[in-house]
Image (cartoon, helix red, strand yellow):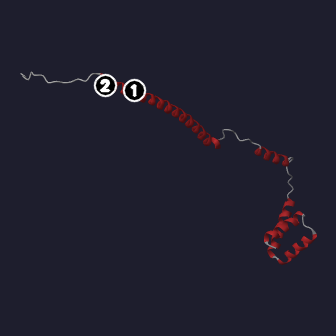
């Protein structure tokens, strides 16, 4: 048997959980193993010292212990707990950024449509100017005979 098994068997004997064959095996091990005997003595001293304590447990101790366990396990986490504050700040910032992005995209589309309309108008004006230049009669410049310049 290893030390853990021996210790578990000794604890089971003090708790009254061993049957007769396991008790016989335990005492056989105790007769040859000095460390096991020391562990047995320590457990025996511990049991004797506990039996000397005459202090009674307070009334309803079990109920108070179980009640305190119940209180700690049934606490519901708050929506805005301190530990969630950075996460909530991040969520709020993300929502603000999404709203700003949607606004900027809509403005960009409005400006793009305005630019397309402006481009069409400029092309129409350019064609109008070309038509006006072509509509006037050609001007012919002729030299005059008055060559005297004073």
User: How many labels, in total?
Assistant: 2
Look at 51% across and 33% down and name the residue there: 104
Look at 74% across and 41% down and name the residue there: 76
Residue 85 position (above or below residue 42): above
Q: Residues within 10 Å of mark 1 (few under 14, many from 20)?
A: few
Residue matched to label 1: 124
State the separation of the CA atoms marked 2 and 1.
15 Å
Marker disc for residue 134: 2
Mark toward the viewer: 2 or 1:
2
Q: Position of residue 82 (x, y in %)?
A: 64, 41
Say which quarter of the image contains residue 30.
Answer: bottom right
Q: Position of residue 52 (x, y in %)?
A: 86, 60
Q: Position of residue 145 (x, y in %)?
A: 10, 22
> Upstream in the sequence, badge 2 or badge 1?
1
Look at 91% across and 73% down and name the residue there: 24
Say which quarter of the image contains residue 10.
Answer: bottom right
- Badge 1 element: helix
Say which quarter of the image contains residue 97.
Answer: top right
């Amino acid at each position: 048997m290893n030390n853990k098994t021996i210790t578990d068997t000794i604890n089971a004997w003090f708790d009254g959980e061993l049957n007769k064959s396991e008790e016989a095996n335990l005492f056989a091990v105790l007769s040859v193993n000095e460390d096991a005997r020391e562990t047995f003595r320590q457990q025996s001293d511990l049991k004797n010292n506990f039996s000397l304590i005459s202090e009674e447990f307070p009334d309803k101790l079990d109920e108070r212990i179980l009640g305190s366990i119940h209180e700690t396990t049934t606490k519901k986490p708050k929506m805005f707990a301190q530990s969630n504050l950075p996460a909530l700040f991040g969520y709020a910032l993300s929502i603000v950024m999404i709203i700003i992005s949607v606004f900027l995209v809509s403005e960009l589309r409005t400006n793009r449509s305005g630019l397309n309309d402006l481009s069409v108008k400029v092309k129409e004006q350019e064609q109008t100017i070309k038509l006006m230049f072509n509509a006037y009669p050609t001007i012919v410049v002729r030299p005059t005979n008055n060559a005297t310049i004073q």
